[in-house]
Amino acid sequence: MRTSWKWPAAVATLTGLFFTGACAPARQGDIPANGAIPTDVMGVARERGLTPDDLYAAAKTFMPSGKHDDYVLFASGGHSGQVHVIGVPSMRLLKTIAVFTPEPWQGYGYGGGPSEVLKKGNMPSGKELTWGDTHHPNLSETKGSYDGRFLFINDKANARLAVIDLRDFETKQIIKNPNAISDHGGSFVTPNTEYVVEGPQYATPIGWEYSDIKNYKEKYRALLTFWKFDPLAGRVDVSQSFQMELPPYFQDLADAGKGASEGLVFVNSFNTEMATGGVENGEPPFEAGASKNDVDFMHIIDWRKAAAVAQHGPTRTVNGMRVIGLDTAVKEKLLFFTPEPKSPHGVDVTPSGENIVVAGKLDPHVTIFSTAKIRAAMAKGSQEKDPFGVPILKLDDTKETQVELGLGPLHTVFDDQGYAYTSMFLDSAVARWTLGGADKGKHPEPDWTLVQKLPVHYNIGHIAAVEGDTATPGHGYVVAMNKWSTDRFLNVGPLLPQNFQLVDSARPGESMKVLYDSPIGVAEPHYAQLIRADRLKPYEVYPFVGYNPETGKKDPNAVLSPKDARIVRKGKVVEIFTPVIRSHFSPEHVTVNEGDTVIWHLTNIERTRDAIHGFCIGGYNVNLSLEPGEHQTVTFQADQPGVFPFYCTEFCSALHLEMMGYFMVKPR
Ligand code: K7E
Ligand code: CUA
């Protein structure tokens, strides 16, 4: 293992001072016995027992006040249902974007437009869903590179997709998959964000039909969904979207081809055994039944051809969605299989698109497939079929090579130096290895070779690198997204945070180092993407007063000036028009009758950056966040008589506490 990084000579000569017996006080900041508090870097380092490696890490990650990070990490918030936005290299949490879970500080789910966005994600039965299990955030792409415009994320638990607009970092659309209840291999975009792909996980009867699990092979199916994205509207166009039926294997991660492999989508699978569990009835449990075979199947889907079939048929429509049947997918040559090592997890396309890397949880290798070989094998076809008639292309005809990495390889990302980085769950390590072919880059080592394994703490799941899943990756940093933190942080009780470790991925020929441990105390993150900060161009304030963030237009009920404040009564409907500005709402007295419908229009007419106001009504579960220029309308029933103060929930000025009023409901 190389350790060739250079420590500045002047500092190196001082290194000897670190452990020369100066007795460190019990806690940093305590006054030592000799009364001397260190005031210089080396003194502090000595006092805290820091090594040159520690000082290097500190210098690499410290962000002076007012300076900004170079990269932004968009991380799934796991079963918090949200997305975390983290600056890199400082690893500071910049924001949590509310997606599938109500989030009061963002006014998300407590009245107004955001509540309507959330409601669209309810079950078709009307059953309310107030959380999600977010796994894979995916940034919109142009020509296979991030364009900084939109972010998509899936909800594994309920098979939903969310669209976040990166002009204001807000969730604009949640779509409930009309036919599936479980997903995982999503969201993944095609190289120009033509489609957002939502891959399945656990097979079920399509569209919530009931069927006994004894009929698993006949009745249960997986669905791969292609959501058509309209970049001008910034929304998925459900009417132009389609689904493809897949066998009832448990499909896992997916990735869209790019460059050489553009037009294809790759989807992993496990449980090609079609185990159905039932350990309580003496059947083999899932964990045994679903890992019997030595290989599972990587699915190869020609999405361009599939889109043409969706357009011209034959398809059937299920719950308003066009579905390409499994038999059609076979007949039209839309779907092929090739064996992949037992119980794989990640499938990742290299920057050139020439190779596809599959990591098998239960296999010590990564298997690298060749796009050219896959295309040739697809053209040739295969006599070997799975039980559903899907052609199986021979592994020898599709495989480029294998690289042995160790225990539990999961996910792989890439840099522009010709390296791949694979997370090793069981080894608790990041494996760096070399690519060949079009992705060879500048590495001095032989192609397809393990170069270094860096221990991380602990049980790494996903891994992110600088634009490391695009056609144009950068280099310098890798983030290890560790499932367990165990002893890394102060004990906060038995529910522990996860641990994101920032890794210096250094230059070719040098060694990786851990730079920073960042506790993620808000649910288990899965995937994350790391984008150059200069690709993002968010609003500083909304572009004009009266902006409705849900429509992107001026709201017809916008209250544009203080003189527009008014109350309009029509029978049992009371409409209030409230301009919001430091430090008052007007009107300040709003009196209605019990049973009235209240429609309250509020516009933040500020143009000053960060002049945010909140609007809450105690006892009525209403809380809005009104950013400069933003308009929201909240509608509710005045169903509780009494006097309810409303106030601003953001400390916006010296007279913020005075920014209040009374909502008075006269009893019947
Ligand atoms: Cu957690 Cu991508 Cu859902 Cu692997 S997945 S870790
Ligand atoms: Cu407005 Cu506080």
Image: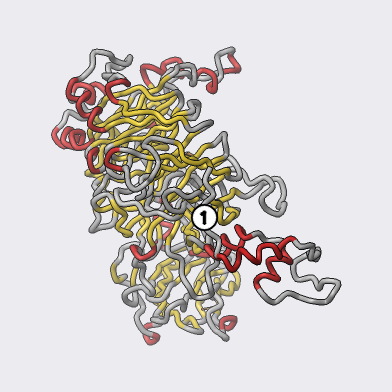
| Above or below, 256 relative to 9 | above
Residue ID at (38%, 17%): 217
* The quadrant where residue 376 appears: top left
Residue ID at (38%, 60%): 532
Q: Can residue 584 be seen by looking at this rendering? A: yes
Give x and y (percent) for residue 585: 48, 81
Crowding at dot 1, Cα within 10 Å, few <14 / some 14-19 / many 20+, comes out as some
Q: Is residue 617 left or right of residue 71?
A: right
Q: Is residue 347 left or right of residue 144?
A: right
Q: Foreground residue, 602 or 302?
A: 302
Q: Can residue 639 be seen by looking at this rendering? A: no
Q: Foreground residue, 583 or 621?
A: 583
Q: Residue furthest left?
A: 312
Q: Amino acid at mark 1?
A: Trp
| Above or below, 334 relative to 28 | above
Q: Foreground residue, 545 or 168?
A: 168
Q: Is residue 309 left or right of residue 180?
A: left
Mark 1 lies on a secondary structure that is loop
Disc 1 marks which residue?
5
Residue ID at (39%, 55%): 117
Q: Quadrant of the C terminus?
A: bottom right
